[in-house]
Image (cartoon, helix red, strand yellow):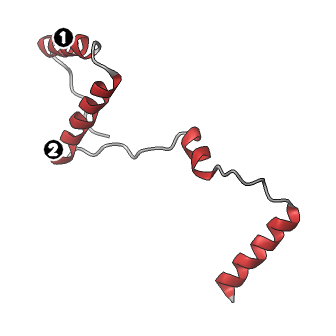
Amino acid sequence: MGRVTEVSSNDDIEISDILDRVKTWTPEMRMELVRRVLGTFDSAGVSLPAKRLVLDDVVGLIKTDSPTPDDNQCTKIIEEERLKKYG
């Protein structure tokens, strides 16, 4: 991780003033500000932590309207995939 630096009291006051103003914005405006601020890190050579998927995101990726396959269907799927892979 990068070095942690202290924020001066003047900087802290300025950040607090900005935060107070931003709190009145719509969620969409605040999210756009976050995107733009994070975008400034790319050019500054600061690496951002890797994005981690939240459980809801993962469930959304694998969710289907189809019913869950039974044991026989799973066995058939596995056999088909083995045939594709190994011939």
Q: Secondary structure at mark 1?
A: helix
Which amino acid does the dot numbered 2 rest on? Ala
* Location of mark 2 (residue): 44
Q: Name, please, the residue furthest toward the bottom.
A: 87
Nearer to us in this view, 66 or 61: 66
Which amino acid does the dot numbered 1 rest on? Asp
Place of residue 52 in the rendered image (x, y in percent of width and height, measured from the top left): 47, 44
Nearer to us in this view, 3 or 81: 81
Q: Is residue 67 depicted above or below 3 in this figure? A: below
Q: Is residue 14 depicted above or below 58 in this figure? A: above
Q: Is residue 43 depicted above or below 77 in this figure? A: above
> From mark 1 to mark 2, how far is it between C-alphas?
24 Å
Residue located at (57% from left, 50% from top): 61
Place of residue 58 in the rendered image (x, y in percent of width and height, measured from the top left): 58, 46
Q: Is residue 6 left or right of residue 56?
A: left
Mark toward the viewer: 1 or 2? 1
Q: Is residue 19 left or right of residue 62?
A: left
Counting other residues with Cα less than 10 Å from the Cα at mark 1, is it few (<14), some (14-19), or many (20 or more)? few
Residue located at (77% from left, 53% from top): 67
Quarter holding the N terminus is top left
Counting other residues with Cα less than 10 Å from the Cα at mark 2, is it few (<14), some (14-19), or many (20 or more)? few
Q: Name, please, the residue furthest toward the right.
A: 72
Q: Name, please, the residue furthest toward the left.
A: 10
Residue located at (67% from left, 82% from top): 84
